């Protein structure tokens, strides 16, 4: 039985937590509330000039967003990116982590640095280089395809290929981060388990299936949720590579929100999109946690 | 609670985005005080580079004024100007694309220039192309002085046209189409005549303006795309594709425009002044005598042979504390000799008509086409929502070209979309909170 904290103790706790709480309130809670209020108005380019003309529209922005073709198109593109890109990203991260953890591999820290380098490189520099790689005539990618007799692909100009191109770039850019987390997860699995499995006659696949995967379950939950949230917020890659084109095939929800907010200055509509995306991401996260819990 | 961390991160990212919206609070201060007045000018792209050269003469004439030029890329210009306005960090003056003037005047970011022009001995609306000047006049108030101009004319293969029996581009839509058909008859299999990229809105809008449509009606508060004028233009446009004269492709599907033009895949193309240099440079030498430019034909031979008014203006910001000095920069850059120097440095066409008498411009007949067309330019609707509407026009035209929808229902859908975009403007006009549009 613990006695309730003495008054001076709780005061000390508030003093320690105070600065952080104040910052969170100022830079997180307040903008979030402001954004929500904004999403209930039609604050737009006219309202910036004279705020008096902003009107309260209730859920009007939400209804209009859900009615618009642009939103559903953006949501479809985003889901495409999440459903295809996130698993690939997970698998590549896991594969790289397994390779780096293999006993036979030498110069591990060198490879770890190389694989992690794209994560810390600025996306704009990356985009410049990748635009060359994707160039339909001079690009390395099409050159390699040509060597095996496949026709040139207009990576960023063809509506069917633009999203795969964005996915490829994103996976390459981001897998290093989750790789490190997987490496840490793999190190936390005791070697004795592998030895015991080997003694019991388990082959490499069985060891992976019955020792590695269960051992990584908590890591999987963390990485799965963060990757999904991150991938739902697809923005920078299409913004710098395609500006959402061709034929809006790479316009993601966040890019649509950015367009509404900072290109057309419909801050109300943009805020509504943000909150809809928040709801979708929240739902996705809950589903994922429920699945993980059921498996355990 | 393992989930809180990623959550906080996800929501934090939103907060960051919105923080942006809310954080435009404190703008940075104005020019530092000193003996010299320092004013800030923002200019875009190549213009931002060459204007620094032009302004050396200005600073020599005005030792008390220092002009600090900031060059901003076109792709970021719109956002940067808007964010600067909201953050109260606008420059003293800036180059502004003339289709953006309506938007920035709605934001009340721009200084009305009427009093300055009245007092000025060098700037007078009559010395500029009237269609271009008009783009700077929003609901009766002048907000910008044209700096350089831009419009669209027809680039065509004169050799192929001649082979088809025409020595020049006919002036009316009907005869022009006959000429296209004659060219098509002599063209190779799989070749077309007129390249109208389906991912651009300019052409269909130009045809609409030529047919006499104002594109919007009721004080620019509703779409007028189902009106008889625009429908006539739209039918002309769609038929070019249906008759096999124009290929239904986007310009992203054409890997090298100049090569295809030289090859004869198409022999007519509507484009702007920047392509004069490109055509001269990129077409093979033997092709140089085989192409020409012509003012755009109109619906009737003596009808409205108009094109769109483009280019950039110089504007003063309301928030500027050095408007007198900034206005002197505008006056300086508007001098005919500075306009010619500007043209020589970067090829931008002068906005002042007298500058066109300079030999550099007058000697070139292809350039002369632009001079002629500039006498007949009209502006697109001068409202902040226009760019959004233009994108809708392009999407609707592309659907009709690709046969996904019938032209009439495409236009009806377009009007519905446009009415939705203009809902706020309609409300403002009905409540008398936005000044009425055109007389």
Image (cartoon, helix red, strand yellow):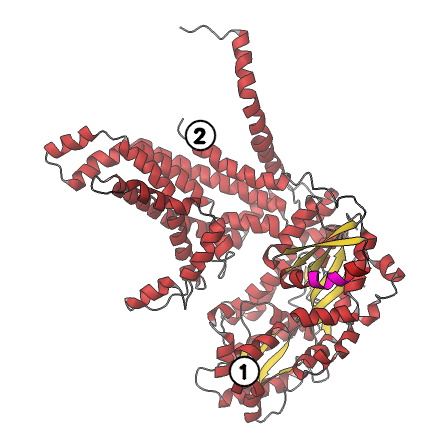
In-image side of A203 versus B346 (left or right) = left
Chain bearing tag 2 is B
Q: Position of residue A258 (x, y in %)?
A: 56, 49
Q: Earlier in the sequence, mark 1 or mark 2?
A: 2
Which chain is home to disc 1?
B
Q: Residue at x 67, y 40 (%)?
A: A56
Q: Quadrant of the C terminus of chain A?
A: top left
Q: Position of residue A31 (x, y in %)?
A: 60, 35
Measured as percent of width and height from the top left, residue B180 is found at: 56, 85
Q: Residue at x 69, y 71 (%)?
A: B343
Residue position marked by numbered label 2 in the rendering? B4
Query: Label 1 belongs to which residue?
Result: B267
Q: Is residue A244 above or below residue A106?
A: below
Assign a secondary structure to mark 2: helix
- Does the segment drawn in magenta span residue B55? yes
Q: Residue at x 62, y 79 (%)?
A: B154
Question: What stretch of residues is rendered in magenta?
Answer: B52-57
State the CA–CA distance, disc 1 to disc 2.
63 Å
* Magenta region, main secondary structure: helix
Left or right: where does residue A123 sit relative to residue A145?
right
Rendered location of residue A140, percent (x, y): 37, 63
Q: Would you say residue A154 sits in the magenta stretch?
A: no
Dot 1, crowdedness within 10 Å: few (<14), some or many (≥20)? Answer: many
Dividing the picture into quadrants, the one containing residue A96 is top left
Please indicate whether residue B43 sits to the left or right of residue A254 in the image: right
Q: Quadrant of residue B216?
A: bottom right
Q: Nearer the viewer, residue A236 or A114?
A: A114
Q: Residue at x 76, y 53 (%)?
A: B66
């Amino acid at each position: 039985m613990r006695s309730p904290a003495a008054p001076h103790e709780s005061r000390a706790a508030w003093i320690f937590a105070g600065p952080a709480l104040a910052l969170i309130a100022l830079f997180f809670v307040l903008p979030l509330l402001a954004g929500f209020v904004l999403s209930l108005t039609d604050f737009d380019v006219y309202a910036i000039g004279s705020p008096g003309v902003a009107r309260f529209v209730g859920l009007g922005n939400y209804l209009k967003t859900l009615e618009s073709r642009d939103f559903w198109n953006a949501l479809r593109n985003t889901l495409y990116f999440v459903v295809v890109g996130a698993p690939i990203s997970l698998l590549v991260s896991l594969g790289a982590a397994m390779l780096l953890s293999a006993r036979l591999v030498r110069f591990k820290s060198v490879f770890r640095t190389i694989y992690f380098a794209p994560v810390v490189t600025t996306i704009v520099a990356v985009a410049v280089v990748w635009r060359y790689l994707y160039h339909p005539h001079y690009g390395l990618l099409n050159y390699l395809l040509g060597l095996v007799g496949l026709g040139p692909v207009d990576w960023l100009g063809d509506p069917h290929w633009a999203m795969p191109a964005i996915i490829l770039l994103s996976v390459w850019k981001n897998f290093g981060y989750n790789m490190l987390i997987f490496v840490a997860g793999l190190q936390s699995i005791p070697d004795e388990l592998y030895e015991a499995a080997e003694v019991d006659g388990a082959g490499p696949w069985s060891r992976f299936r019955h020792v590695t995967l269960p051992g990584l379950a908590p890591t999987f939950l963390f990485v799965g949720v963060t990757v999904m949230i991150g991938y739902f917020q697809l923005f920078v890659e299409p913004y710098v590579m395609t500006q959402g084109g061709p034929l809006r095939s790479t316009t993601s929800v966040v890019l649509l929100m950015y367009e509404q907010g900072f290109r057309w200055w419909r801050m109300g509509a943009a805020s509504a999109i943000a909150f809809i995306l928040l709801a979708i991401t929240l739902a996705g996260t809950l589903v994922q946690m429920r699945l993980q819990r059921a498996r355990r | 609670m393992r989930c809180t961390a990623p959550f906080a991160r996800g929501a934090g990212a939103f907060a960051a985005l919105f923080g942006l919206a809310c954080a435009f609070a404190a703008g940075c201060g104005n020019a530092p005080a000193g003996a010299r007045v320092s004013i800030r000018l923002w200019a875009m792209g190549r213009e931002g580079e060459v204007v620094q050269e032009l302004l050396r003469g200005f600073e020599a004439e005005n030792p008390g004024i220092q002009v600090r030029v900031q060059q901003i890329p076109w792709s970021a210009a719109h956002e940067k100007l808007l964010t600067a306005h909201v953050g109260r960090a606008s420059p003293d003056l800036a180059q502004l694309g003339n289709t953006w003037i309506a938007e920035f005047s709605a934001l009340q970011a721009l200084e009305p220039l009427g009093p300055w022009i009245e007092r000025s001995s060098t700037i007078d609306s009559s010395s500029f192309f009237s269609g271009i000047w008009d783009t700077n006049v929003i609901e009766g108030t002048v907000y910008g002085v044209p700096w350089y101009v831009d419009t669209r004319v027809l680039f065509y293969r004169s050799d192929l046209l001649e082979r088809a029996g025409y020595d020049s581009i006919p002036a009316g839509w009907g005869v022009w189409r006959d000429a296209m058909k004659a060219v098509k008859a002599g063209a190779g299999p799989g070749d077309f005549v007129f390249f109208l990229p389906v991912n651009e809105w300019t052409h269909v809008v130009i045809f609409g303006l030529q047919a006499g449509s104002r594109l919007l009606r009721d004080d620019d508060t509703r779409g007028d795309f189902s009106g008889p004028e625009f429908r006539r233009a739209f039918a002309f446009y769609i038929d070019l594709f249906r008759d096999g004269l124009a290929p239904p492709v986007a310009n992203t599907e054409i890997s090298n425009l100049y090569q295809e033009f030289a090859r004869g895949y198409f022999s007519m193309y509507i484009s702007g002044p920047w392509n004069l240099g490109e055509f001269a440079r990129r077409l093979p030498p033997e092709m140089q005598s085989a192409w020409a430019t012509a003012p755009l034909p109109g619906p009737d031979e003596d009808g409205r042979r108009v094109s769109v008014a483009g280019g950039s203006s110089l504007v003063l910001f309301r928030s500027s504390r050095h408007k007198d000095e900034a206005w002197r920069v505008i006056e300086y850059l508007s001098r005919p000799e500075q306009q010619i120097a500007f043209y020589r440095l970067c090829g931008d066409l002068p906005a002042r008509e007298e500058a066109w008498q300079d030999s550099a411009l007058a000697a070139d007949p292809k350039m002369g086409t632009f001079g002629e067309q500039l006498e007949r330019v009209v502006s697109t609707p001068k409202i902040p929502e226009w760019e959004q509407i233009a994108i809708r026009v392009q999407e609707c035209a592309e659907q009709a070209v690709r046969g996904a929808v019938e032209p009439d229902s495409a236009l009806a859908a377009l009007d519905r979309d446009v009415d939705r975009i203009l809902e706020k403007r309609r409300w403002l006009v009905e409540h008398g909170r936005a000044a009425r549009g055109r007389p």
